[in-house]
C-alpha cells in the first residue's frame, strides 16, 4: 500500500511540475533551462546541418539579399542602424542581433536554420516559399552582416542599387507583418 501511495505522490509532483511550467514569453527561463535550451539548439542544428549539400554561396546579388533580409528578418533581428526592431521586444527567447558579432554558425548551418526555423521559438522556417538560391544568398548575407555599417546597409536600398521595382516576381507574405 505504501508503495502505491508513494507512486501516486510522485505522479502528482510530476504533473504539478509539468502543468505549472510557466510558458509566458514575458518571463524568462531560469539560467539552467536557458543554458540547456541553447545547448540543445546548437547540437541539433549542427547535427541536422551535416546533411546540407553546399550550394552556390552567392546565387543572388547583395542588394537582392539585403532586400530579402530587410523584409524577412529585420523586424525581429534588427540590422545595422536598426537597433530596436518592432517584434524583438515581445519574443522569448529574444531574437539575437545578427549584425553585432560575426555569426557563430557556418553558412551551411545558417542555410539550415533559415530554411527550417527553430522549434519552440519565434524563428520561422522560410523553406516552403523561398528558393534555395534565395536562402543561400541570405545565409551569406547574414555571415557578412557584422561588417556592414548603417550606411552600407541603407545604401543597398538607394535608388541606384535597389533592384528594379514593379512586376515583382517575389512577394513577401509569410503570415507575419512587416
Ligand atoms: C518572427 C521573428 C523572427 C523572424 C522574422 C526571423 N527570426 Fe531568426 N530567430 C528568431 C528568434 C526568436 C530566434 C531565437 C532562437 C533561440 O535563440 O532560441 C531566432 C534565431 C535565429 C538564428 C540563430 C541565432 C543564434 O545564434 O541563436 C539565426 C541565424 C536566425 N534566426 C536568422 C534569421 C534570418 C536570416 C531571418 C530572415 C530570413 C530570420 N531569422 C527571421 C526570430 C525571428
Image: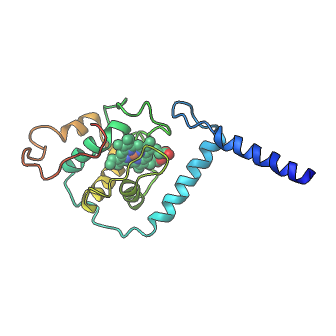
* Coloring basis for residues: rainbow
Quadrant of the image containing the C terminus: top left
Is residue 78 at all visible to an observer of this figure? no
Identify which residue is drawn at 41% across, 39% down: 97
Foreground residue, 91 or 163? 91
Query: What residue is shown at x 47% (from left), y 45% (from top)?
Result: 121
Quadrant of the rendered image containing residue 83: top left
Q: How many marks?
A: 0
How far across and down, in percent of the image, does residue 107 sit? 38, 58
Residue 8 in view here: yes
Give the x, y percent position of residue 119.
Answer: 47, 51
Position of 109 relative to 98 (above/below): below
73 left or right, relative to 30: left
Q: Relative to the observer, which residue lies in front, 47 or 125?
A: 125
Q: Position of residue 152 (x, y in %)?
A: 24, 39
Question: In this image, 175 relative to 28: left or right?
Answer: left
Residue shown at 90% from the left, 53% from the top: 3
The location of residue 135, given as percent across then percent down, is 30, 57
Query: Which residue in the rendered view is the most extreme toward the right?
Result: 2
> Is 40 left, or right, of 116 in this rendering?
right
User: What residue is rendered at 19% in x and 38% in y?
Assistant: 155
**The one of 131 and 159 positioned closer to us in this rendering:** 131
Amino acid at each position: 500500500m505504501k508503495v502505491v501511495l508513494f507512486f501516486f505522490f510522485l505522479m502528482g509532483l510530476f504533473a504539478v511540475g509539468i502543468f505549472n511550467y510557466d510558458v509566458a514569453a514575458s518571463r524568462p527561463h531560469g539560467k539552467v533551462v536557458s543554458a540547456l535550451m541553447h545547448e540543445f539548439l546548437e547540437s541539433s542544428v549542427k547535427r541536422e546541418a551535416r546533411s546540407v549539400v553546399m550550394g552556390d554561396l552567392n546565387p543572388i546579388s547583395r542588394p537582392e539579399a539585403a532586400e530579402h533580409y530587410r523584409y524577412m528578418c529585420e523586424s525581429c533581428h534588427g540590422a545595422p542602424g536598426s537597433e530596436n526592431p518592432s517584434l524583438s521586444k515581445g519574443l522569448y527567447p529574444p531574437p539575437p542581433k545578427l549584425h553585432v558579432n560575426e555569426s557563430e554558425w557556418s553558412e551551411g548551418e545558417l542555410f539550415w536554420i533559415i530554411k527550417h526555423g527553430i522549434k519552440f521559438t519565434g524563428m520561422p522556417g522560410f523553406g516552403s516559399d523561398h528558393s534555395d538560391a534565395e536562402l543561400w544568398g541570405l545565409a551569406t548575407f547574414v555571415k557578412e552582416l557584422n561588417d556592414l555599417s548603417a550606411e552600407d546597409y541603407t545604401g543597398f536600398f538607394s535608388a541606384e542599387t535597389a533592384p528594379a521595382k514593379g512586376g515583382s516576381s517575389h512577394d513577401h507574405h509569410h503570415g507575419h507583418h512587416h
